[in-house]
Image (tube, rainbow, N blue to C red):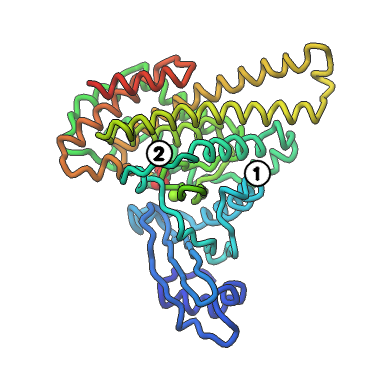
C-alpha cells in the first residue's frame, strides 16, 4: 500500500523489498546501516541518495501533490508511472544517455536508479561557468534518436498509436498547458515577478494581438500535435553530466507531442543562461552550443529518416527521383520542427521570467536591478522570436546578440 516515505520509512520499505535490499546489502546485513539523505530540490518529487555497502542508488518518490506549491495543489502519483515507462523506452533508444533503472514500483510511485555521483546538474554547472565540449553532440543525438524512434516514421501507425495510448499524461500536460501557455500571459495569482522588473513590458506582451495569437497557436500545437514521445521537461535541470558523459533524467512529463517542444525548451534554457552571463567567453560557448545543438539535431534527425527509408524501400518512393522527393519532404518537415522550436522556446522564456517556476541562472541573481535588466532582455527576445518567421538558427542567434547589446 502507498505511503509517503522519509529516511526512516525508506529503511522499512527496503527491508520489505528484496529487489532493492539485495542491491544494497549482503544477505546478513540490516537496513539500519544504510545511509540516507534527501537531496531533491525539484518542483515535484522527493529524491533520496541511499548508500549501502554494496551500492549507492537514487530513490525517487512521487507524492500526491505538487512539491513546489504544497499539499494544497494535489497531483496524482501516476506521474511516476509515466517516468518509469519513459525511462525504459529512452534507455532502449539511447542507452548512453539514460541512467540505469534498478527497480520501479507503480504502487509506491518509486523508482530506484543509478546514482550519478560522478555527474552534476547542467544548470548548476552553467551557472558556475563550466564548459562541456561534448554537450551538443550528446544532446543532439538524444533528441534526434528519441524523437525519431518513437515517431510514426519509425514505429508505423499502429505501434505508434499504442504508444500514444500509454502516454496520455493528462495531469502533467495540464501543468504545462497552465504554467507555460496560459498563466504567464494573464494576471494570474500564481505568477511571480522580480519587484524591480518594469511591469509595463509584461503588460505590453499581454495585450499584443500578434503575440497572444502566436502563444495560443503554440498551446494548440502542444495539445494536438502528437508527433513523438517527448521528454516533456527538457530544461538544464533535467540533465546530469561530466566532461565525458551526459545523462537525461526526470521524464515524468513524457507524452506524445510536437518534436519542437523538447528542442525548444532545451534551447530556451541555453538562451536564458546566455543572457544571465557577464563572461564573454562563456557567452560565446553558449552561442556555439545553441547553433551546434540545432544543426546537429537537424542533421541526425534527417539521417535517421533517410537511412530508415532506404532500408524500408517503400513502394511510395520507388521511382527514379523517389529518394530525392522523400528528402525534399524531410527538409520541409525539419523546417516545420524549426518553426515550432522557436515558438516553444519563446513560451519557455516568457514563463521562466514571469511565471511560477523560474530558472536559477537568473532568479538567483541577488542584485534585483541587474536581474531585471536581464529579464527585460529575455522578455524582449521572446516577444520578437514568437512572432518572427525565422528559418535559420543564425537569425535566432543574431537576435539574442542584438538584445544582449541593449
Ligand atoms: C508549477 S510549474 C512546475 C514546473 O516544474 C517542472 O520542472 C516543469 O517545468 C513544470 O512546469
Ligand atoms: Mg523535473
Answer with the quarter of the image where residue 181 lies.
Answer: top left
Q: Is residue 213 visible?
A: no
Mark 2 Cα shell of 10 Å, populated few (<14), some (14-19), many (≥20): some
Query: Pointer 2 and pointer 1: residues touching (CB < 8 Å)?
Result: no
Left or right, 231 with respect to 270, comes to right
Residue most extreme to the top: 321
Tally of numbered discs:
2
Report the residue at 56% width, 51% height from top: 98
The location of residue 159, given as percent across then percent down, is 73, 40
Give SS at disc 1: helix
- Which of 66/141 is in front? 141
**Disc 2 within 8 angstroms of ligand 1 (CB):** yes
Q: Which residue is mark 2?
A: 178
Q: Looking at the image, tell me whether mark 2 or mark 1 is earlier in sequence order.
A: 1
The answer to whether residue 276 is above or below residue 102 is above
Q: Which residue is mark 1?
A: 165
**Disc 1 within 8 angstroms of ligand 1 (CB):** no
Give SS at disc 2: helix
The location of residue 188, given as percent across then percent down, is 29, 37
Left or right, 213 with respect to 93, comes to left
- Which of 181/131 is in front? 131
Amino acid at each position: 500500500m502507498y505511503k509517503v516515505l522519509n529516511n526512516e520509512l525508506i529503511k522499512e520499505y527496503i527491508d520489505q523489498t528484496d529487489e532493492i535490499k539485495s542491491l544494497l546489502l549482503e544477505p546478513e546485513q540490516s537496513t539500519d546501516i544504510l545511509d540516507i539523505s534527501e537531496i531533491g530540490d525539484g518542483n515535484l518529487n522527493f529524491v533520496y541518495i541511499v548508500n549501502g555497502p554494496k551500492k549507492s542508488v537514487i530513490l525517487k518518490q512521487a507524492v500526491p501533490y505538487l512539491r513546489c506549491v504544497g499539499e494544497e495543489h494535489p497531483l496524482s502519483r501516476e506521474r511516476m508511472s509515466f517516468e518509469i515507462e519513459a525511462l525504459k523506452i529512452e534507455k532502449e533508444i539511447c542507452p548512453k544517455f539514460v541512467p540505469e533503472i534498478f527497480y520501479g514500483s507503480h504502487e509506491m510511485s518509486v523508482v530506484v536508479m543509478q546514482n550519478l555521483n560522478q555527474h552534476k546538474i547542467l544548470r548548476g554547472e552553467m551557472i558556475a561557468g563550466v564548459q562541456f565540449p561534448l554537450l551538443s553532440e550528446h544532446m543532439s543525438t538524444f533528441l534526434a534518436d528519441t524523437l525519431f524512434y518513437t515517431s510514426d516514421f519509425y514505429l508505423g501507425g499502429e505501434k505508434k498509436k499504442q504508444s500514444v495510448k500509454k502516454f496520455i499524461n493528462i495531469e502533467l500536460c495540464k501543468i504545462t498547458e497552465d504554467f507555460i501557455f496560459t498563466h504567464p500571459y494573464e494576471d494570474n495569482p500564481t505568477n511571480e515577478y522580480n519587484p524591480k522588473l518594469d511591469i509595463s513590458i509584461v503588460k505590453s506582451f499581454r495585450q499584443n494581438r500578434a503575440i497572444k495569437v502566436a502563444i495560443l497557436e503554440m498551446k494548440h500545437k502542444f495539445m494536438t500535435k502528437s508527433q513523438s514521445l517527448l521528454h516533456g521537461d527538457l530544461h538544464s535541470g533535467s540533465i546530469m553530466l561530466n566532461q565525458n558523459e551526459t545523462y537525461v533524467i526526470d521524464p515524468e512529463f513524457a507524452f506524445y507531442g510536437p518534436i519542437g517542444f523538447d528542442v525548444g525548451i532545451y534551447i530556451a534554457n541555453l538562451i536564458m543562461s546566455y543572457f544571465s552571463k557577464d563572461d564573454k567567453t562563456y557567452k560565446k560557448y553558449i552561442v556555439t552550443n545553441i547553433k551546434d545543438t540545432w544543426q546537429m539535431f537537424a542533421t541526425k534527425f534527417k539521417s535517421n529518416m533517410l537511412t530508415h527509408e532506404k532500408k524500408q524501400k517503400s513502394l511510395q518512393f520507388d521511382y527514379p527521383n523517389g529518394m530525392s522527393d522523400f528528402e525534399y519532404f524531410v527538409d520541409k518537415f525539419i523546417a516545420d520542427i524549426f518553426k515550432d522550436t522557436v515558438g516553444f522556446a519563446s513560451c519557455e522564456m516568457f514563463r521562466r521570467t514571469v511565471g511560477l517556476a523560474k530558472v536559477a541562472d537568473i532568479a538567483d541573481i541577488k542584485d534585483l536591478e541587474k536581474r531585471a535588466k536581464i529579464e527585460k532582455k529575455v522578455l524582449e527576445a521572446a516577444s520578437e522570436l514568437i512572432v518572427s518567421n525565422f528559418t535559420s538558427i543564425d537569425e535566432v542567434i543574431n537576435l539574442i546578440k542584438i538584445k544582449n547589446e541593449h
